[in-house]
Amino acid sequence: MVVSILIHILSIFVLSVQADYPLRDGRPTSEGIREYVEDNADSLIRQYEQFIGDTLYNVWIYTGDLTRHGIADTIELGFYYSDEIYISDAELFYAYELKDLPRYLRASAKRDNRFVKSTILHELSHDYFAQVAWEMVGVDSVHVDRAFMPYVWVLREHESFGSRFIEEGICEYIVEKMGEVIAQKKPRAPRSIEELTSKENEYMMMYRYSAYFLKDFLDQKGFKQGLKILAHNPPPRYDEILNPDRYFNRLKEPVPLSR
């Protein structure tokens, strides 16, 4: 008991020394989250642009109480809509950045993306995916499946699940490529629709397994071209997520629409 208390105290001390922003019990405070986002938003956009080799247009990053946007689920630490990103200022993050978390604490982290920086990068990927979709329609003159058109919300249940699965996987894939989440071993694939859609498995399926599901495809096609192919085709059905070859074998390259 004494040893565990000492370890906890030491953890708080180490984190306090490492972090440039205020902490409470070793974790980012609401005030610190707001300060971090205000100080680093522009530089993180530039870092993201440099990594993907493309430009983000008209994206704004704010902090706030996500429950005001109807989000009460603690899995969701960020929210994106119409070129605006909102980062939760609730004291739920492990650290401001992954590098702030000592290595000996990473192994005990039950979830691996609770960092302010990784959340911002994740939400920037939502913005980039929407930008690519608009570019496909307005510049490339190619079809975007309705499930991936920005601001189209009236979908059948399997389309809604599949499109979210793909988009969250894209976001977590790029954040992992940027080295801003704790690396995990290969996640276990779901064995049934019930396991895939279970609320208690939501984080593992929607964020961890989805990124793994897309990894080889995006590595092979390249990030932007991969996004265009994914947006061009209908999202995976439940059976295609359980059997990935069914999904990837039916994907077609986008072709310009005849004028």
Image (cartoon, rainbow, N blue to C red):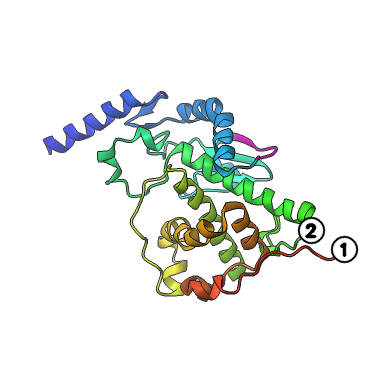
Establish if 236 lies above or below 15.
Answer: below
Q: Label 2 amino acid?
A: Ser
Under mark 1, the amino acid is Arg
Toward the right, the furthest residue is: 259
Q: Are marks 2 and 1 in contact (CB under 8 Å)?
A: yes
Q: Position of residue 142 (x, y in %)?
A: 75, 61
Q: Quadrant of residue 85?
A: top right
Look at the picture and state if 70 lies above or below 167.
Answer: above
The local secondary structure at tag 1 comes to loop
| Quadrant where the C terminus is found in the figure | bottom right
Residue 259's tag is 1
Q: Which quarter of the figure is the N terminus placed in?
A: top left
Q: Which residue is mark 2?
A: 141
Total numbered badges shown on the rendered structure: 2
Give yes or no for residue 76 being in the magenta stretch.
Answer: no
First of labels 2, 1 by sequence position: 2
Could you say which is closer to the camera, residue 212 or residue 96? Answer: 212
Residue stretch in magenta: 55-61
Image height of 178 relative to 16, above or below: below
Q: Residue at x 50, y 56 (%)?
A: 219
The percent coordinates of residue 84 (x first, y second) are 65, 40
Residue 61's spot in the image, x, y percent? Answer: 60, 35
| Residue occupying the point 74% across, 63% down | 143
